[in-house]
Image (cartoon, rainbow, N blue to C red):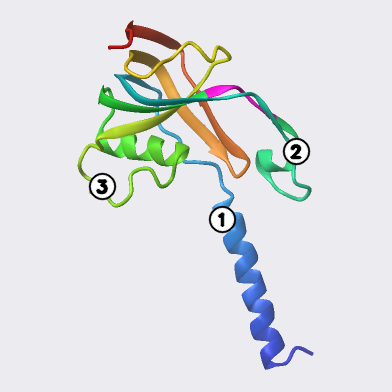
Amino acid sequence: MIKGFQFVFALYCLLVIMAVHSVAAPLPPFAPVDITGKIQEVSWVAEQQSKGIPGMSGSAGNDRTLPAHFLLKLTDYTGVNAETARQMTSYIDGHALGEESEKTLPAFIMLQINHEDRNLLKKGMTIRLDGYTVKGDEGGTWTSYARLEVLQHED
């Protein structure tokens, strides 16, 4: 028989388990977008192997390869509204935008561009991405695009 404290403790544990599973849901999707903008900051990350965590759902439970990619801070951009700009930036870096108003267009967006050539993109370039989208779950964030075009090389 469960007594008062044991019942409360069991209920608390159940709520914690439910909360963990609700956080581990896939990222809400957005339609692919066409973005043009200037690279303000750029870094390249080599391909990495990530071990799965036993018992985790989604991709976190499986071994996976994280592709080589660029992390970009894009300014003077067009192609997305304020809501989409915030959503896609938060998927790449949840703290990048800070406390800016949710209704105004952010001054920049963060993008993850999968590419093996670490020399392809440089600060100051103007680029266009067609069909860019972000997906993911508790195991990671995946981006894709249909086409990447360098419109203008560095200043």
Q: Position of residue 42 (x, y in %)?
A: 42, 25
Nearer mark to the viewer, of 3 and 1? 3
- Give coordinates of residue 20: x percent, y percent: 60, 59
**Residue 98 screen position, x and y as percent:** 33, 49
Most common SS among magenta residues: strand
**Of the two numbered discs 1 and 2 in the rendering, the one whose residue sits closer to the viewer:** 2
> Any mark on residue 51, and which?
2
Crowdedness near tag 3: few (<14), some (14–19) or many (≥20) residues, C-alpha within 10 Å:
few
The secondary structure type at the circle numbered 1 is helix
Residue displayed at 38% across by 14% down: 130
Magenta region: 65-69
Q: Is residue 18 above or below residue 68?
A: below
Front-most of 155 and 52? 155
- Residue positioned 71% across, 49% down in the render: 56
Q: Does residue 127 lie above or below 112 as drawn?
A: above
Which residue is nearer to you in this view: 97 or 87?
A: 97
Mark 1 → mark 2, Cα distance in angstroms: 22 Å
